[in-house]
Amino acid sequence: MTAPKRERAPLNGVDTPNLFATINVVKENPGLGTFQFRASNAWVKGTHSRTTIEGFSGAGGDHTHSTTFQYDADHPKVLVGGDAGPTPVEFLLHGLASCLTAGIANIAAARGVELSEVRSTVEGDIDLRGILGLSNEVRNGYERIRVNFDIKGNAPAEKLREIVEQSRARSAVFDVITNSVPVDISVNAG
């Protein structure tokens, strides 16, 4: 005897029917799953710069966000900046937390779990001796990142932990951070 098929409805603010429709379309047409996300950045002054995010390509075409997003980044005064925005490495923590949280919302909705709260804290340990060129033994980036989730919903604790684990396993940002990704840098100087 098989369990009756559960009708999928929007849950946790996730359009679950559209989520599964998208999964099925990409399953049938893998090329539609190839995306390119872009950002442009301009120096303002000192350590302050501004990144603009407008569009991306994917699902067979180019797309423009409904809003042009701009984010300032800077160093705090203690690191000789003007503190006009978070540091670039703090944006990395934001990207990791928001990617994992989005995954949790989608996966919970797909499993029929209603969430009442998802909170996280993300900490990254960094030794600036690497960036400052004071040690070749110290890496420039984070030495360790810790993410702690508090999650509540209408499912047992074990199922909620499984949702977080599945989100980790499917997170694009987690993948980028934990696996080596080639980065090509070109320079037009003049």
Image: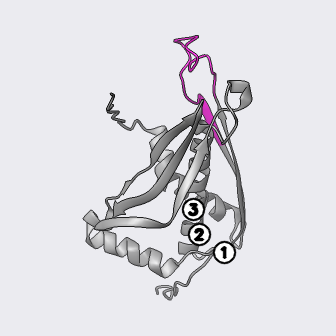
Percent position of residue 20, x then y: 43, 76
Label 3, residues with CA under 10 Å away: few <14, some 14-19, many ≥20: some
Q: Amino acid at mark 2?
A: Ala
- Who comes first in sequence, dot 1 or dot 3? 3
Percent position of residue 4, x then y: 50, 89
Residues drawn in magenta: 126-146
Give the spatial CA distance, label 3 vs label 2. 10 Å
Q: Which residue is mark 3?
A: 102
Which-is-in-front pick, marks 3 and 2? 3
Q: Main secondary structure of the magenta part?
A: loop
Tell whether position 132 is magenta.
yes
Tell whether position 95 is magenta.
no
Farthest residue toward the front? 190
Position of 130 compared to 20: left or right?
right
Residue 142 image-quadrant placement: top right
Examine the rendered structure and indicate whether residue 3 appears above or below residue 104: below
Which circle marks residue 37 in the picture?
Answer: none
Q: Amino acid at mark 3?
A: Ala
Percent position of residue 128, x then y: 63, 21
Circle 2/circle 1 CB separation < 8 Å: yes
Q: Which residue is mark 2?
A: 108
Q: Which residue is mark 1?
A: 114
Q: Is residue 165 visible?
A: no
Give the spatial CA distance, label 2 vs label 1. 7 Å
Examine the rendered structure and indicate whether residue 158 appears above or below residue 121: below
Position of 115 compared to 47: left or right?
right
Q: Residue at x 70, y 32 (%)?
A: 76
